[in-house]
Amino acid sequence: FTFPKISEASKMKLTTVALQILLVDFFLKAGVLSETPTDTFKGCSTPSFEWATYSNRSTARMYGMRGAYANGNIFAAGFVKSTIDPDVTTVVDDHEFSISGPYSVSDATGTNAITKTAKLRSYSGAEGAIENAGGSFGQYDVGVAKIDAVTGEPKDFFVWHGDSLDETSGLAASGDSIAVSGHFTGHLAATLVDGTTKTIWNSNVGEGGIALDADQFHPNNKSGHAETGVDDGFIIKANADTGVADWIVHFPQSNADAEMVAVDFDTSMNVFGAGYSCAKADDAEFKICDGVVAMFASSDGALMWEKTLPDIGALFTIKYDNEQEGGLYVTGT
């Protein structure tokens, strides 16, 4: 009988495996390793935490973007959407979205949890780019959850509705007020303190118009010249207890893309906003984006001043210095 020839590479592999077996056997005998796993790296033990509050319905989803704290409450802002396609599924619950809590280590199933619900408009797939989970990708609303910071109990959920893509990117809370900002492609509406409803329309769509799917597309593209829709910016200042808006403003406006990325309050409850505004000429290959900073009056949202920063493509954060009144800090790129 003749043994088959073994290549040098195979010999090295066999030698390595044999050495590994010898090392494991040595460590077991030396007590360095245990034949019975003793660690809990992949165990089922629950990590320690104060509380957890979250949305637990498959009929809607929320994408959390920003958080803020004021008067013992946590505010979590993002954009929300119904996952129901009314052309396919009958809407049996008038409140698709819910937020429930608190959950804790001692009450993991939420025996004492409280649930707050909110009504969202359900769009058919024909009314926007179809998403795998159902419903429409291009139909989002602005949402803010209010949660007790100590207990984790959800107190309320505020929603501002609009047709097409409404994205939340900024949030600030101070005293009995919150400010929310972002950008939108179709229209966005808010019920005001006097009971009336104010609707702002994207400048590229016009009143009564509907945004095209192509204008709502936001690719994950690192190119600063990439097509990112024809959004306009918005800011909403609202009562932190009721969610009723003091005002809603349409700023900045653009034929390419614009957004109020971040907001903050000063000591008089005026609102500062920071973001960007892009423009694209009819015969231009690329758009040009400038950073934007603006101040809005506390009472009615009137534009008090604005400053364009052409050497900065976009601003991402803004912070008012409460200790040194008049200090304003921004970051961007």
Image (spheres, helix red, strand yellow):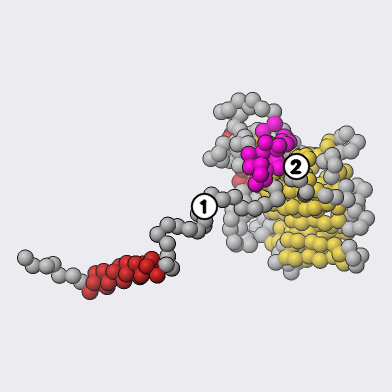
Q: Amino acid at mark 1?
A: Gly
Quarter of the N terminus within the rendering: bottom left
Q: Which residue is mark 2?
A: 153
Q: Residues within 10 Å of mark 2 (few under 14, many from 20)?
A: many
Q: Residues within 10 Å of mark 1 (few under 14, many from 20)?
A: few
Camera-near label (2 vs 1) is: 1
Can you tell which quarter of the image residue 122 is in?
top right
Of 205 and 220, nearer the camera is 220
Task: Verify CB contact (< 8 Å) between mark 2 and mark 1.
Answer: no
Q: Amino acid at mark 2?
A: Glu
User: From this viewpoint, is residue 110 visible?
Assistant: yes
Q: Which residue is mark 1?
A: 43
Q: Position of residue 169 (x, y in %)?
A: 72, 52
Q: Secondary structure at mark 2?
A: loop
Q: Position of residue 299 (x, y in %)?
A: 92, 48
Q: Is residue 189 left or right of residue 124?
A: right
Can you tell which quarter of the image residue 103 is in?
top right
Q: Residue at x 32, y 67 (%)?
A: 21
Of 55 and 127, nearer the camera is 55
Magenta span: 95-117
Of 181 and 206, nearer the camera is 181
Quarter of the C terminus within the rendering: bottom right
User: Residues under labels 2 and 1: Cα distance?
Assistant: 29 Å
Note whether 261 is above or below 4 in the view shown.
above
Q: Position of residue 234 (x, y in %)?
A: 78, 49
